[in-house]
Image (cartoon, rainbow, N blue to C red):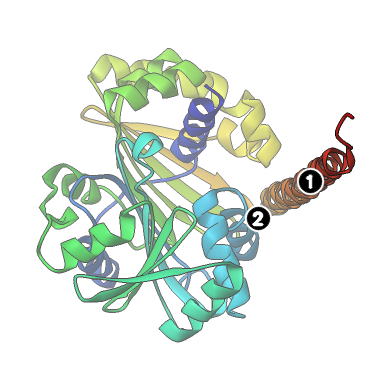
Amino acid sequence: MEKRRCIAAALYVATLLSAMSLLTGTAAADVVRAAKYLPRDSAMVGAWNVARSRGSTIGDPMARVLSTTSPLGRFIGDIVANADLKWHAHLDIITLAMPANVAKSGRAVVLIEGTFESEQIVAALQKRGRVRTRTYRGIQLYEQKGFEMTFVDRYWVIGQKDGATRVIDVSLGRSGSLARNKKVLELLKAADLGKDVWCAWALPKALREVLAEATDAQFANVGAITASIDLADKGLRTRVRLALSDRDAVVEMGALLRDKAGRDPRMTAIGLGAAMGALRLSRYQNNLDIKVEVPDQDIGKVRDYMVKLADSASRQRTDARAGAETDKDAAKAASGTRDRRGKDKRRGKSRKRPAE
């Protein structure tokens, strides 16, 4: 239940912090290219154009949050650190895709474009721990503790479970690509792919129910989200489009956000209370468009929140590692004690003299 609530909370924040618009030039070309490598059953696809946002004041804290708050992010963060790479210097575009049942399947996949060598990345992975290497359909594949990693054309590919092998299958034409997923492609037409961060998410019924349970019943009517964030030098501009079931649902959702968004404790904690209280809403057919502008004076609050979140996640990981080492030492000590007792018992039996 806790995991489900975390997923719902993350969705809620994404819903209130992201955006919509029109396909544009180079950005659209990047997406079309990546879609040819992503699995067809992806229900969510999003990207962070790191190169475009290099001048942003919250870029580095954002990278820290991504590399500390989830298993997949920590895996990538460890490799980036071990390879002496810098997020804003060597990584250009990070694309994430997930199927609708990602909580069960764990099949999230990440494509990374940037300035690095595959040998450099593999060496960094080996520093992290034992690596199993095998060849899959003629392509070298690296496996470590539930993650797969490979290199396909211009992409560094990281997947949970069989995520990377699925990308290989797609790249070789053995499996369908996201480029054939009409539902997600239609959503992408409403996403502003030219912004620093964007996502398009088709929400299945089960996930809508989880979202509604953790937030408000109105979110059960959200069928899809398209979102974007512009990490400007001054201020933070975000836009969201919620695809709802009908006109009444649009009106009710608008009323809910006007009433509660500015007073939501999660938004206040992030430093977005004032901005959310001044959000602008508009309706397009059965869609609710949300526009939020965070002024420059509040960016520091957002940055501070990200730093605290990353620091907290790092401490928890350090404590977990220390606890695991303590448990390992205790188990080793207990095993040694049992071995000594066994030896003493055997010695006692061998010294026992037979009765006369």
- Amino acid type, residue under disc 1 in the picture: Asp
Q: Classify residue 134 as left or right of residue 274.
A: left
- Amino acid type, residue under disc 2 in the picture: Asp
The residue furthest front is 356
Q: CA distance from mark 2 to mark 1?
A: 65 Å
Q: The residue tagged with tag 2: helix, strand or loop?
A: helix
Which of 238 and 134 lies nearest the eye of the viewer?
134
Residue 211 in sight in this render: yes
Give the total of numbered labels.
2
The quadrant of the rendering that contains the C terminus is top right
Q: The residue tagged with tag 1: helix, strand or loop?
A: helix
Residue 57 in sight in this render: no
* Disc nearest the viewer among 2 and 1: 1
Q: Classify residue 160 as left or right of residue 335.
A: left
Q: Which residue is mark 1?
A: 339
Label ID, residue 302: none
Q: Which residue is mark 2?
A: 296
Q: Please give the name of the residue rendered at 21% of the width and 60% of the height, measured from the top-left corner.
A: 35
Residue 306 at x, y = what percent? 67, 50
Q: Please give the name of the residue rendered at 47% of the width and 48% of the height, measured from the top-left corner.
A: 238
Which of 163 and 198 lies nearest the eye of the viewer?
163
